[in-house]
Image (cartoon, helix red, strand yellow):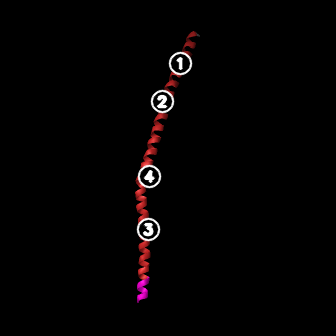
Amino acid sequence: MDDMIKQILDAVTDIKVEQAKQGKDIAQNTKDLSTHIEGVKQCQTRLDTLEKPAIALNTIKKWALYISAIAGAIVVVHKLYKL
């Protein structure tokens, strides 16, 4: 009977040790995840900053295309009325 109690106590002790180890692992994983999330946010900020000039350039190109299309239409109408 005493041997059985000793085995149970040893098993409980092993469980407690394993729980402490897993608790430390969870804490480390949480810390690593927080660091990773912060890195992703920084990368997104950098990416947004890098994309701003490209977005502006594309907008300028669209406006230039619209203006040139309107100018072309004006030239065509002007030439038609000169005939």
Cβ atoms under marks 4 and 3 closer than 8 Å: no
Q: Secondary structure at mark 4?
A: helix
Instruction: Please tell me which of labels 4 and 1 falls first in the chain.
Output: 1
Residue drawn where x is 43% and y is 79% of the image: 74
Q: Is label 3 or label 2 in front?
A: 3
Q: Residues within 10 Å of mark 2 (few under 14, many from 20)?
A: few
User: Residue 15 placed where, x, y %?
Assistant: 53, 22
Cβ atoms under marks 3 and 2 closer than 8 Å: no
Task: Reply yes or no: does residue 82 show up in magenta.
Answer: yes
Q: Is label 3 or label 1 in front?
A: 3
Residue drawn where x is 49% and y is 27% of the image: 24
Q: Residues within 10 Å of mark 1 (few under 14, many from 20)?
A: few
Instruction: Please tell me which of labels 3 and 2 falls first in the chain.
Output: 2
Q: Which residue is mark 1?
A: 13
- Judged left or right of residue 6, residue 72 is left
Give the distance between the C-alpha atoms of the residues marked 3 and 1, in whole angstroms: 74 Å
Q: Quadrant of residue 69?
A: bottom left
16 over 39 or under it: above or below: above
Q: Which residue is mark 3?
A: 63
User: Magenta stretch?
Assistant: 77-83
Instruction: Please tell me which of labels 4 and 3 falls first in the chain.
Output: 4
Q: Is label 2 or label 1 in front?
A: 2
Locate the N terminus by quadrant: top right
Q: Residues within 10 Å of mark 3 (few under 14, many from 20)?
A: few
Give the distance between the C-alpha atoms of the residues marked 3 and 2, in whole angstroms: 56 Å
Q: Which residue is mark 4?
A: 48
User: Residue 41 placed where, x, y %?
Assistant: 46, 45
